[in-house]
Amino acid sequence: MLVRLMTGPNGSIIRAIASGESRTGQIARAIGWLKAHFREPFSGPDLAGLAGMSISSFHDHFRRATAMTPLQYQKQLRLQEARKLMLADRLDAAEAGYRVGYDSPSQFSREYRRLFGAPPQRDMGRLRALPQVALAI
């Protein structure tokens, strides 16, 4: 099946994406870096350079691919990881926030509430009350 894809009518597009030569491949490289380093601060110019693009082109293509800015994407990664840590390891909000890169517990709590619709403690109470099968989904 892979051979058919690579040699078919859209093979050149698929090969370009896989090799990182396409804009999609370049953005995927930046997303991969963000996923691996979400705890760390980053600069827009450095991330654009990693993708091999100008800053304005990078932001435009990143937004088209993810529907958010690189900073928003990083925040979402951090908050999702913190939620996992609080649920699986039973960390409190301040410790989970610190482990994912937040210096301020209040900033972490505000951003958590904005993304998940409830402050961390209330959200954890709700999630822990769910049957285990629901949490696995």
Image (cartoon, rainbow, N blue to C red):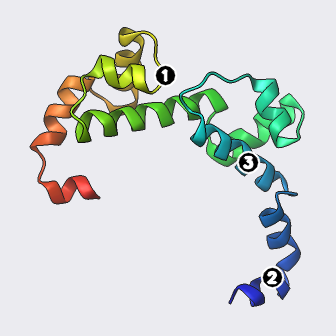
How far from the left and from the top, in percent, is residue 128?
Answer: 14, 41
Q: Classify mark 3: residues with Cα within 10 Å, few (<14), some (14-19) or many (20+).
A: some
- In-image side of 12 versus 71 (left or right): right
Q: What residue is disc 3 on?
A: 29
Left or right: residue 76 versus residue 32 is left
Res 6 label: 2
How far is mark 2 from mark 3, CA to CA? 21 Å
Q: Which residue appears at 49% of the width and 22% of the height?
A: 101
Which residue sits at x=69%, y=39%?
63
Q: Position of residue 30 (x, y in %)?
A: 72, 42
Position of 88 compared to 125: left or right? right
Q: Residue at x 45, y 27 (%)?
A: 100
Q: Quadrant of residue 93?
A: top left
What secondary structure is found at the residue carrying circle 3? helix
Residue type marked 1? Gly
- Mark nearest the camera among 1 and 2 is 1
> How many residues crowd mark 2 within 10 Å: few (<14), some (14–19), many (20+)?
some
**Residue under circle 1?**
101
As drawn, is 66 to the left or to the right of 28? left
